[in-house]
């Protein structure tokens, strides 16, 4: 195990040694470059069982940061994400063709995960795929990048979605993510480049004759305030799309359509669709930037801002023909998707310019040369100025409509109410974190997940500390001061709960600390002036006293409205029931986003999906299987046949993985259930009516649900 010790560290090597048994062994083959994320990668030779026959695996030790808590699940969510139907188009098979599958459930290693991934091969299985970053710059590389963009739009996002009311500042902050925080590396780099002007609305940049709008999110009065794009295209997005995360066949020749995407740790189902293609385009621009003179760089920026996608003649350009080819290929890659949906220039160009502004800012912290940093800053500022010239004004309220006869219109809010609202940047940041904080609140409220309490509290502390810092640097309104105070209360309550958890000898004190923490986090999240809707109620998580075995119901508070890009169903949490008739909804484990509560159709709750104890060793497979079963529960009656067949295959695979992970337990019952489910799955083919497939799939799921009751009858609530 010396190679594993050197590559992955002592803790991971020890976990791997314990993970191996008579049914599976691995042998170290080759260490791989880890890229810029801090992850560690290696190929291993693998000897598995009948369900895991892969000769070779890719092991990935995720970077030890906040994102690592959800990376394995984000990949599985990307596999499961898809439209329920495709209107007359081809079957939805993007995950099978374009993503890489996990072979075994992830293995917990300290505060991160070790993932077991399939090795990506070309279609004939002759050669492993190579990262696009290893392909030399040129037309071939541009063709691959264009194929990726086309596929992301046409294959991954056939079900168009849009937001028609998103403020421009919210778009910028959503695209930048953690970089928009005032203590981020982008904030420090922007301050180094702009000095005190970083808080001004306009900036004077070297090499530009007139002041430009400040493109950073750190201005006291943002130039994007009170503006919005007419519409924003939303959909499934990678959110870390660069050449190192694109694998492609290059032997014996480069095959653009052979690509697969890796590292989906930032995958989102409702992301800004234009963020990925613009970011990838700027990555390829960087291949050429160093060799360009000042005139060529100015022309390059103009081409990137051009609404026509760059149509400059080769005979008139300072830019090389290879770079012009790259820009034209990548800018036109979205055209088939855009034109099919009638996105004209007035709807498409504003959101493109905002994406260009955000992505250009990302490169400020990645370029070492001062002149390249200045070029990206100038590009972002020019994109911001171009957006201002075509943006629509942001209105706080929809146009008033005439009231019915006999009724009066509602009076406008008093001026003081607007003054006491949170600053827009703070509201947007809270909306971005709200859903995850709600899920963490649910997990921390249940003692059954105390083996993950330290990790969950760490994520809460990181996010609330970021919010507190942003509030401290915002305008000192009463609302901002109150918000900062509530963030501080959450941080103090989290510290007290962690201390009580570490002592482990005073359950009463721990229960009190847990209740205080949940109350503090609820107060932060659920205030009506922070995007919460007072007309909807959200039952609070049930606090379970692990010593007395009783349930304590927290007071009911108003629920937050879904943030932009959130699925409203994911904000619904299980209702707490009175003592003596308690039926808990099993909370989320290890960073998983909670699914919807039981629907009006009477679908089973997650407690019925996985009705057995979850341990660190079984958590990966348990979460994956639960996610699959919930996806089956939510299938509509008109779901497509290919989608059903895909879910059936995944159901059998993940159930087998769970059986293999239950070391030391009698797994005969599960294997019997799996065999019966597999027989059901083999009863249909491409000619079987989808309604019959759906019935078989649900029957298989119900049989697997019975496993928990039979194996752990005394553990079931």
Image (tube, rainbow, N blue to C red):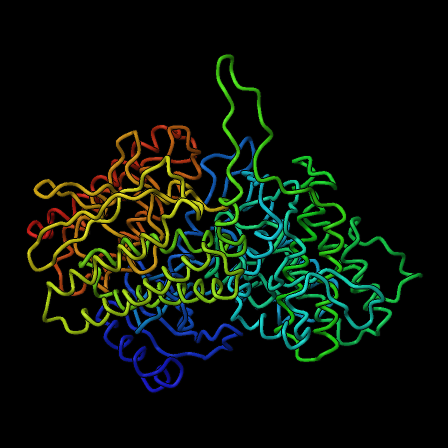
Answer left or right for 18 relative to 113: left
Measuring from the top left, give residue 667's x and y in whole percent.
16, 56
The quarter of the picture where residue 635 lies is top left
> Where 103 sits versus 309, above or below?
below
Measuring from the top left, give residue 226's x and y in whole percent.
64, 47
Measuring from the top left, give residue 637's x and y in whole percent.
37, 28
Looking at this view, name the residue that lies furthest to the right: 315
Residue nearest the observer in this picture, 283 or 299:
299
Q: Quadrant of the N terminus?
A: bottom left
Residue nearest the observer in this picture, 70 or 465:
465
> Where 577 sits versus 24, above or below?
above
Residue shown at 81% from the left, 68% from the top: 297
- How many numbered circles are shown? 0
Residue shown at 34% from the left, 87% from the top: 2
> Where 326 sits versus 56, above or below?
above
Residue 330 appears in the picture as rendered: yes
Residue 60 appears in the picture as rendered: no
Answer left or right for 454 relative to 120: left
Answer left or right for 87 relative to 558: right
Residue shown at 34% from the left, 52% from the top: 438
Measuring from the top left, give residue 531's x and y in whole percent.
44, 45
Residue shown at 54% from the left, 52% from the top: 424
Residue nearest the observer in this picture, 591 or 122:
591
């Amino acid at each position: 195990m010396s190679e594993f010790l050197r590559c992955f560290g002592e803790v991971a090597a020890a976990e791997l040694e314990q993970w191996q048994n008579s049914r599976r062994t691995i042998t170290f083959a080759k260490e791989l470059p880890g890229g810029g994320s801090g992850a560690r990668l290696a190929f291993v030779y693998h000897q598995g069982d009948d369900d895991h026959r892969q000769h070779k695996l890719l092991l990935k030790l995720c970077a030890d940061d906040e994102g690592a808590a959800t990376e394995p699940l984000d990949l599985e969510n990307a596999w499961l994400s898809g439209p329920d139907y495709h209107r007359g188009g081809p079957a939805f098979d993007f995950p099978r063709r374009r993503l890489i599958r996990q072979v075994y459930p992830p293995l917990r290693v300290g505060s991160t995960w070790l993932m077991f991934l399939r090795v990506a091969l070309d279609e004939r299985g002759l050669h492993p795929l190579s990262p696009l970053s290893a392909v030399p710059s040129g037309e071939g590389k541009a063709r691959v990048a264009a194929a990726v963009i086309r596929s992301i739009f046409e294959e991954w996002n056939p079900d168009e979605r849009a937001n028609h009311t998103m403020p421009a500042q919210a778009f910028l902050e959503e695209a930048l993510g953690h970089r928009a925080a005032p203590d981020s590396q982008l904030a420090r780099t922007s301050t180094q480049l702009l000095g005190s002007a970083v808080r001004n609305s306009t900036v004077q940049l070297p090499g530009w004759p007139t002041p430009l709008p400040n493109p950073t999110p750190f201005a006291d009065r943002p130039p994007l305030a009170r503006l919005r794009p007419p519409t924003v295209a939303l959909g499934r997005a990678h959110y870390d799309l660069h050449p190192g995360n694109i694998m492609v066949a290059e032997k014996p020749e480069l095959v653009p359509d052979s690509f697969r995407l890796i590292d989906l740790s930032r995958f989102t189902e409702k992301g800004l669709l234009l963020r990925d293609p613009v970011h990838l385009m700027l990555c390829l621009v960087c291949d050429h930037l160093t060799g360009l003179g000042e005139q060529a760089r100015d022309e390059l920026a103009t081409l990137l801002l051009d609404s026509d996608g760059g149509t400059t003649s080769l005979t008139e350009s300072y830019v090389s023909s290879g770079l012009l080819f790259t820009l034209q290929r990548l800018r036109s890659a979205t055209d088939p998707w855009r034109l099919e949906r009638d996105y004209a220039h007035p709807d498409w160009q504003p959101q493109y310019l905002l994406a260009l502004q955000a992505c250009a800012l990302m490169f400020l912290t990645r370029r070492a040369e001062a002149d390249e940093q200045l070029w990206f800053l100038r590009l972002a500022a020019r994109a911001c100025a171009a957006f201002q010239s075509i943006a629509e004004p942001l209105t706080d309220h929809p146009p008033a409509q005439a009231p019915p006869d006999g009724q009066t219109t509602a009076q406008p809010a008093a001026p003081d109410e607007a003054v006491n609202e949170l600053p827009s940047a703070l509201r947007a940041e809270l909306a971005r974190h709200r859903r995850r904080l709600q899920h963490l609140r649910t997990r921390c409220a249940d003692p059954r997940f105390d083996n993950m309490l330290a990790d969950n509290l760490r994520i809460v502390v990181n996010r609330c500390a970021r919010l507190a810092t942003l509030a401290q640097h915002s305008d000192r309104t009463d609302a901002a001061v109150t918000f900062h105070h509530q963030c501080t209360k959450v941080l103090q309550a989290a510290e007290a709960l962690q201390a009580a958890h570490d002592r482990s000898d005073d359950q009463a004190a721990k229960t009190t600390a847990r209740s205080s923490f949940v109350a503090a986090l609820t107060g932060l999240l659920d205030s009506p002036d922070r995007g919460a809707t007072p007309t909807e109620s959200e039952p609070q998580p049930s606090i379970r006293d692990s010593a007395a075995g009783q349930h304590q119901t927290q007071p009911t508070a108003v629920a937050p409205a879904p943030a932009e890009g959130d699925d409203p169903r994911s904000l619904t949490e299980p209702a707490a029931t009175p003592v003596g008739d308690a039926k808990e909804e099993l909370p989320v484990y290890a960073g998983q986003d909670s699914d919807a509560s039981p629907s009006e159709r009477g679908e089973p709750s997650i407690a019925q999906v996985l009705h057995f104890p979850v341990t660190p060793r079984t958590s990966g497979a348990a979460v994956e299987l639960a996610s699959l079963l919930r996806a089956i529960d939510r299938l509509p009656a008109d779901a497509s046949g290919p989608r059903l067949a895909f879910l059936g295959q995944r159901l059998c695979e993940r159930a087998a993985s769970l059986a293999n992970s239950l070391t030391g337990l009698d797994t005969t019952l599960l294997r019997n259930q799996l065999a019966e489910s597999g027989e059901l799955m083999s009863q249909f083919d491409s000619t079987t009516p989808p309604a019959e497939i759906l019935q078989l799939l649900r029957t298989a799921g119900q049989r697997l649900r019975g496993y928990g009751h039979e194996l752990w009858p005394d553990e079931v609530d």
